[in-house]
Image (cartoon, grey):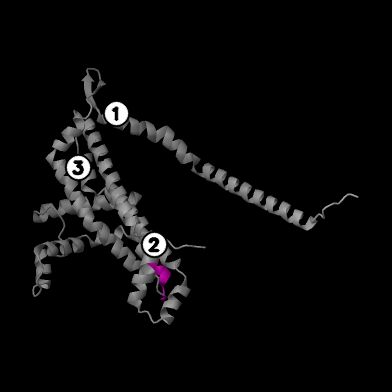
């Protein structure tokens, strides 16, 4: 007599259903991956066909010497690192680079603090909150494209007019060091702190203009924090100060890292950056092109090193919430 094991058809169907469900999920992931590649395909083609040849030409130019031939043509001669040595021998370029790094060490924290402060204010419940958010983002729109060019041209005209009438080469400042010293007259404040505060006040317009994108990123991070977390803190008797330092700041620390890297790169590559302006002012004839190319790539290496080093340091302080 043969003995046959019972067959549980229900379990077999469940297993087959699980396999089909996994296959559906896998196929959906593949479709999303293909859609992503199709979305970035124009950028990849443009980068390979347009940017890569230009980058390679610029790199080869920084290691070359141009020998002009009568008739308008020229021949490139490989000189290895001679152009980079000449760039480092340029005292004005080195001083401009060092002064630019010093100014960024003060400007970037100011932009981050201001944007975070404004984002916290705009995250509160109040009448006209959407209008205030739009108002703080308007400078970002005005600082791009055609309007930026018109603003620059208007500023140059105003400076030229000011030079003719008053003999000055710049527009009058909002506040002077004498005003700050008078404000801190009864305090024991050093001259360095006075100059730092004066620089912040003079550059307040530029700081506000460059804080719009960071403000929106911080605002998105603040709105992603669950209200139940704040309710728990309130029930436990935590003050607003304790809630900010122990809940809000750790929860938005990933946004701080993103904004820091964004602000750093934006400041390094802005048209108003003094290093960028100095490189652009290098003559376009003679040894100018190869020297400017060497300066540009040396500046690029400095930017990469600074961004990588500071990003690695700050990333160690970032708190990532686990979602189990």
**Which badge, 3 or 2, is on the more N-terminal residue?**
3
Query: Which residue is identified by label 2?
Result: 319
Determine the residue located farthest toward the top in the rendered image: 70
**Which residue is drawn at the image coordinates 40% and 74% (left, top)?**
124
Query: Which residue is identified by label 3?
Result: 278
**Which badge, 1 or 3, is on the more N-terminal residue?**
1
- Does residue 117 appear left or right of residue 129 in this picture? left
- The residue tagged with tag 2: helix, strand or loop? loop
* Magenta stretch holds residue 132: yes
- Residue sitting nearer the eye, 275 or 20: 20
The answer to whether the residue labelled 1 contacts the one labelled 2, judged by CB atoms less than 8 Å apart, is: no
Say which of marks 1 and 3 sits in front.
1
Query: Which residue is identified by label 1?
Result: 60
**Which residue is drawn at the image coordinates 42% and 68% (left, top)?**
130
**Which residue is drawn at the image coordinates 12% and 40% (left, top)?**
91
- Residue sitting nearer the eye, 243 or 2: 2
Identify whether 71 is placed above or below 108.
above
Q: Mark 1 Cα within 10 Å, few/some/many (few <14, many 20+)? A: some
**Which residue is drawn at the image coordinates 63% and 51% (left, top)?**
25
- Does residue 148 appear left or right of residue 106 in this picture? right
Residue 222, x across and y down, in percent = 41, 67
Residue 182, x across and y down, in percent = 9, 71
* Magenta stretch holds residue 247: no
Magenta residues span 125-133
């Amino acid at each position: 007599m043969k003995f046959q094991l019972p067959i549980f058809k229900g379990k077999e169907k469940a297993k087959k259903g699980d396999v089909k469900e996994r296959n559906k999920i896998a196929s959906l992931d593949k479709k999303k991956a293909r859609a992503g590649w199709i979305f970035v395909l124009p950028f990849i083609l443009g980068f390979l066909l347009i940017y890569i040849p230009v980058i390679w030409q610029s790199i080869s130019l920084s290691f070359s010497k141009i020998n002009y031939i009568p008739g308008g043509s020229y021949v490139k001669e490989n000189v290895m690192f001679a152009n980079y040595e000449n760039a480092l021998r340029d005292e004005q370029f080195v001083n401009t680079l060092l002064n630019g790094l010093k100014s960024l060490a003060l400007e970037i924290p100011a932009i981050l603090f201001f944007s975070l402060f404004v984002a916290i204010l705009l995250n509160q419940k109040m009448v006209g909150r959407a209008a205030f958010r739009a108002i703080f983002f308007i400078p970002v729109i005005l600082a791009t494209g055609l309007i930026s060019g018109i603003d620059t041209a208007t500023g140059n005209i105003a400076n030229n007019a000011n030079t003719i009438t008053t003999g000055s080469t710049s527009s009058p400042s909002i506040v002077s060091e004498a005003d700050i010293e008078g404000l801190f007259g009864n305090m024991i404040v050093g001259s360095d702190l006075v100059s730092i505060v004066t620089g912040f006040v003079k550059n307040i317009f530029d700081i506000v203009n460059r804080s719009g994108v960071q403000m929106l990123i911080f605002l998105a991070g603040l709105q992603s924090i669950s209200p139940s977390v704040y309710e728990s803190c309130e029930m436990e008797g935590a003050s607003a100060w304790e809630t900010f330092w122990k809940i809000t700041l750790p929860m938005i620390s990933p946004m701080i890292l993103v904004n820091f890297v964004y602000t750093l790169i934006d400041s390094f590559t802005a048209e108003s950056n003094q290093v960028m302006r100095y490189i652009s002012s290098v003559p376009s004839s003679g040894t100018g092109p190869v020297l400017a190319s060497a300066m540009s790539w040396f500046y690029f290496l400095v930017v990469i090193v600074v961004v990588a080093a500071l990003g690695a340091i700050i990333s160690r302080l970032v708190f990532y919430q686990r979602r189990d």
